[in-house]
Image (tube, helix red, strand yellow):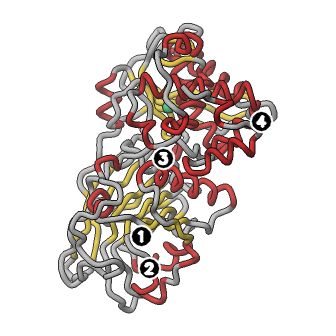
Amino acid sequence: MRVLPVVVLVAVACGQARAPAAPDGSPGPSPAQPPAAVTPNDFLARGLPTFVLGTAGDDRADQRIAGQVALVRGLLFASAPIVTDTSIAAARGLAAWPPRPVLYGGPHTNTLVAAIAPTLPFSLGPGRLVIGGEAFAGDDVRLVAVVPARSADARGPATPELLLYAGTGDPGVAEINAPTVSRGTEPIVVADAFGPLRRGRFVLDAQGAVTAELGPPARRIAWRAVERELAGTKGRAPVRILFPAILPKSRHEEATIEACMRGLTTVVRRLALAKPTPLAIYVYPDRRSKASLTGDGGDGHAVPAARVLHVLVADPAPAGALEGLVAHEGTHVLAYEAWGSAGTPLLGEGLAVWVSGRYAGLALSAWSARLATRAPLGELVSAHFRRLPERASYPQAGLFVEAVHRTLGLAGLRALYGASADTFEAACQRAGAAPARLWPRP
Ligand SMILES: [Zn+2]
């Protein structure tokens, strides 16, 4: 089961400056000339970024933005500064900005983005993005863009070149650094629930203003939905299970739907969710169609920002492959909605493996006997996790979560879930167990 990697910027040499295009804080290219087609990977390769958190949403939105930034920072830019949106007075112009600002959140969740909104070459808000002369509606639209520097004019103050991760949702940035959104190789990506929908770049229009030029839309198809309900301890939520409309109804369809629902019910039960969130499961008949529509040909992946799972059809038998896959991927969506962002892949993937009770078709108990060596907790909690083969990292993550649950219960597990790599040890102590007790040194 190949599941969502957290970040895509692995090609970037962390913190290593590669011939900076401009000194820190300088405006970079002048808007009088055509803006360079700078990609996120170009931007991040220039040196250590400064993460700018949006704090204009409610507590839930603010926590989720901070969680996403902590995750990316912990994996790739451990010494990068984090500042809040309110610490930068955009009206002061370039002098107000930190080097290489990476902004998280749209104008509705980030006051700095709101302050410069009139100067941006697109408009973004709850449920709507307008860019390149086109409108994208819905709360699952995400935008990743390197916005060119600009000089002060009637529309607003000068701003440096900046990298923006924003969505139309609240806050809409869940796993926005995943390759299923942007691989960092395009100056502009507009993504929907399936993945990159439009790619583009910034150019100058006839009046010399910066504007977005979008490429052709990615392929999308019609879907036929079947509705079910998922029960929590205190409320129910609709679940839509969708099949390509062009395909005739399969004789396995009812069994497939039941397997999906059993997988989700396992998530609700193991996480003791009071009221699950509505979600959708897209079922693909084969790997090629899943890859062509989402860019990810793996067995399954989750898009938490859209509350959507994409899964390949698989054995729908009780305790079979499909039920386990949906339990795993459903955890990524339902835990995000209920608990917030996982602070590390160790807990994000570990929780999903533990909930499903298996990895790659083998029960966790079988993995416990099969793993020849165990990595030290310090490695599992760090960026090293993604460098291990998945068949080593995922079962160990599941076993670690099992140990946390056994030792500290669900409340303790939840307390560790959001801890980032650099706060992890302290979070273990606070929750009531030394790390060595949870994961004895190999
Ligand atoms: Zn996963």
| Local secondary structure at mark 1 | strand
CB-based contact (under 8 Å), mark 4 and mark 3: no
Q: Position of residue 199 (x, y in %)?
A: 28, 54
- State the image quarter where residue 277 is shown: top right
Q: For mark 3, what is the residue?
A: 175
Residue drawn at 52 percent across, 69 percent down: 107
Q: Quadrant of the C terminus?
A: top right
Mark 2 is surrounded, within 10 Å at the Cα level, by few (under 14), some (14 to 19) or many (20 or more) other residues, namely: many
Residue 76 placed where, x, y %? 41, 51
> What secondary structure is found at the residue carrying circle 2?
loop
Identity of the residue drawn at 38% across and 58% down: 144
Mark closer to the chain start, 1 or 3? 1
**Residue that label 1 marks:** 101
Task: Say which residue appears at 61% left-offset and 42% top-offset.
Answer: 336
The amino acid type, in three-letter code, at marker 4 is: Ala
Q: Which residue is mark 2?
A: 97
Q: Which residue is mark 4?
A: 274
Closer to us: 107 or 49: 49
CA separation in Å, label 4 and label 2: 43 Å
Give, as a three-letter code, the residue at label 1.
Pro
Q: Left or right: 284 with respect to 68?
A: left
Examine the rendering and report whether any part of residue 267 can be seen.
yes
Q: CA distance from mark 3 to mark 2?
A: 25 Å
Horizontal and vertical percent position of residue 206: 19, 79
In the rendered image of this protein, does residue 110 appear above or below residue 413?
A: below
| Tag 1 near tag 2, CB within 8 Å | yes
Among numbered discs 1 and 4, the one appearing first in the sequence: 1
Q: Is residue 63 left or right of residue 295?
A: right
